[in-house]
Image (cartoon, rainbow, N blue to C red):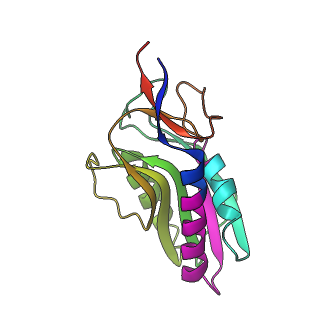
Amino acid sequence: MRPGRVLVDEEAIATRLAEMGAEITADYEGKDLLLVAVLKGAFMMMADLARHILLPVDIDFMAVSSYGAATETSGVVRILKDLDQEIAERHVLIVEDIIDSGLTLDYLRRNLEVRQPASLEIATLLLKAGIQRVPIEVKYVGFEIPPDFVVGYGLDLVGKMRNLPYVAVMEED
C-alpha cells in the first residue's frame, strides 16, 4: 500500500485549525481548559491547534489502542497510557485525529466522564461520515471525509507515514 490522492492538503488543515482555535478560544474564555490528545495520532493536531487557542491551556496525553496492526478497529479498547493529571471540575477537550466507528472514543469518553470533569467535549481533525457504530457528539470537526483508510498528519499505517504534512487516501500498489 502507498499514499495516493491527497484528501486534505496542508493549507486546508492550517486554515481549519486556525478557525477551530478561534472557536475554542471564544467557547472557553475564563475557563480552566485541559486539552487531552489521544496518542499517537493526535500529537500533530494538538500542537498546531494549541497554538491557535489564545488562552492559557494545560495539555495532557492518553494512549489507547483498538487497531493493533490492522486497518480497521477491533472494537476492543486498551488504555496504554492514562492521564497524568486529575480532571475533576476541569473543562476537558479531547483532541482526536480521526473518528470512524466511534467505539474507541465512546470508551474513552465514558472513562473520563466518571472522573467528573466540569465539561467534556471532543475536537477531531477528521470524521468519517456515516460509519459510526455508536452515537458520538463532536463539538469541533475539522473535515468530514469518506470512509477510506487515510494516512498523514499524524495518521499512520503500522506506525509509518504520520509525518506527511497532508492527509492522503491509501491505495493498493
Q: Which residues are magenta?
A: 15-42
Q: Quadrant of the C terminus?
A: top left
Q: Quadrant of residue 77?
A: top left
Residue 83 can be seen, yes or no: no
Number of callouts? 0
Q: Is residue 119 above or below residue 71?
A: below
Q: Where is residue 127 drawn, in percent x and y? A: 39, 51
Determine whether, in the image, residue 54 is placed left or right of residue 76. right
The residue shown at (66%, 35%) is 163
The residue shown at (35%, 38%) is 75
The residue shown at (57%, 82%) is 26
Q: Is residue 45 above or below residue 162?
A: below
The residue most toward the top is 173
Q: Is residue 132 above or below residue 24?
A: above
Determine whether, in the image, residue 143 is placed left or right of residue 83. left
The residue shown at (55%, 68%) is 19
Q: Where is residue 18 drawn, in percent x and y? A: 61, 65
Residue closer to the observer: 95 or 14: 14
Residue closer to the observer: 12 or 30: 12
Residue closer to the observer: 81 or 167: 167
Q: Is residue 160 above or below residue 52?
A: above
Q: Quadrant of residue 15?
A: bottom right
The residue most toward the right is 56
Residue closer to the observer: 157 or 22: 22
Q: Where is residue 161 drawn, in percent x and y? A: 60, 29
Residue 20 located within the stretch drawn in magenta: yes
